[in-house]
Image (spheres, grey):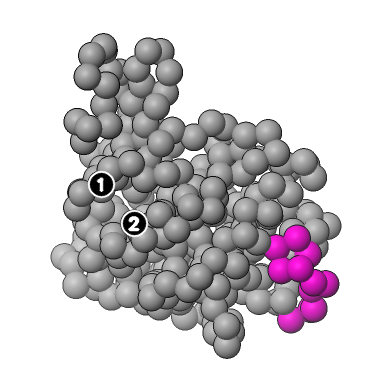
Amino acid sequence: MNSILPEHGEVEVVPLEEGFSNKTYQISWQQQPRLVLRISDLNSQAFAIERAAELAVCQLVSAQRLGAKVLWHNEQAIVWEFLPGQTLAWDVQHTQASLMPICQSLSALHQLPSIAQEYDVYRVIADWLAQLAKTDMTPELRALTQQTRTFYQSLKPVPRPAQLRLCHNDLNPKNVLLDGSKAWLIDWEAAGMNDPLFDLAVLAHVHHLTAAQLQHAYQAVVGSEPMPVAFEAIDAYRKAYVVRELVWLLLRHQLCGSQDLDCLQWYHALLNDPVFNPYFKAEPV
C-alpha cells in the first residue's frame, strides 16, 4: 500500500461511519481526500460474500465509470480512489434531477458482461437463517429468529427470469454518491447476477419512491413500459428485502456482538418502522 501513499507529507486518516458492514476510512493529504480504505469486518463465509467476485465487479464497474477505481487490495482490505459527491440521507426524497442519474447508472450496470457469481435474495435469507440455527442463541435471539423465519416463510418468491443481469443488490442511499448529474455506485459486496427488478425494488423501497417515480425509474432502467406483473414482482422483492435486512442484523449480532453496532436495537427499530416495514407485524418477544 505504500506505493500509493505520498513519500513526504502528513497523511490524515478519518473513519467513515456511514456503513454497517466493515471498517472504512478516508485518507487525505495536502488537505484533499484522496483514497478510501475498506477493511473487511465480516465473516465472508457466513455472510456469503465472495471477495474475489467483489473485486472483479469493482474492477469491471470502474472501467465503465460506474464506481471507484481500485488502486490496491489484499485479502483483508481494498483501497479505492476517492470519489466526489455526497451520499444520500436515509430519508431521501428524490426529484427527477436526483433520481435519473441513479437510474442511468443502474441501466448501464445491467448491461455489463456476466460474471460467475449469482445472487438470489431468497437463498441468501435461507442461508443466513441456517447459519443462525448453528449458533448458541439466547432465548431472546431464538424468539426473534423464529419470528423472522415466519416472515420468510410467508414470502412468495418471484420466479427467476431466464436472463439474469449484473446487479448491485444493496442500493441503499448510503451506497450512492451523487455528484451533480453523475451517480456513482459504491459497496459491491452483494453484487452478482440477479433479476434487475430486485435492484429496482430496493431503490423504490429505501429511496422512498412514489408510484410515479417508480414508473419513471422502471422506464429508465428497463427501457420499456412496465407490465402489472413487473410491479407485482417489485412488491414481492420489497418484502424479501425487509426480511433480508432483519436476518442480517440478527446474524451480525450473533457473530460480531454489539461492540460497534447494537444490531438488536436496530432490528426492533426497523421492524417497528411503518415506512421501512409496512408488511410484517411484530409479535411480543
Position of residue 56 measured from the top left corner of the image (x, y, whole percent):
36, 61
Q: Residue furthest left?
A: 136
- Quarter holding residue 159: bottom right
Q: Nearer the viewer, residue 94 or 80?
A: 80
Q: Secondary structure at mark 1?
A: strand
**Who is closer to the viewer here, 153 or 230?**
230
Instruction: Decide if residue 74 is on the left or right side of residue 217.
Output: left
Near-viewer residue (149 or 114): 114
Q: Position of residue 239 (x, y in %)?
A: 57, 68
Give the quarter of the figure containing the C terminus.
bottom left
| Badge number at residue 55 | 2
Residue bounds of the magenta highlight: 219-229
Circle 1: residue type:
His
Q: Amino acid at mark 2?
A: Leu
Count residues near mark 2 (Cα–Cα under 10 Å), then give few for <14, some for 14-19, many for 20+. Answer: some
- The residue positioned 45% from the left and 43% from the top of the image is 68
> In the rendering, at what x and y percent does residue 202 appear?
59, 60
Residue shown at the point (83%, 72%) measured from the top left: 225
- Residue 266 visible? The answer is yes
Q: Which residue is mark 1?
A: 73
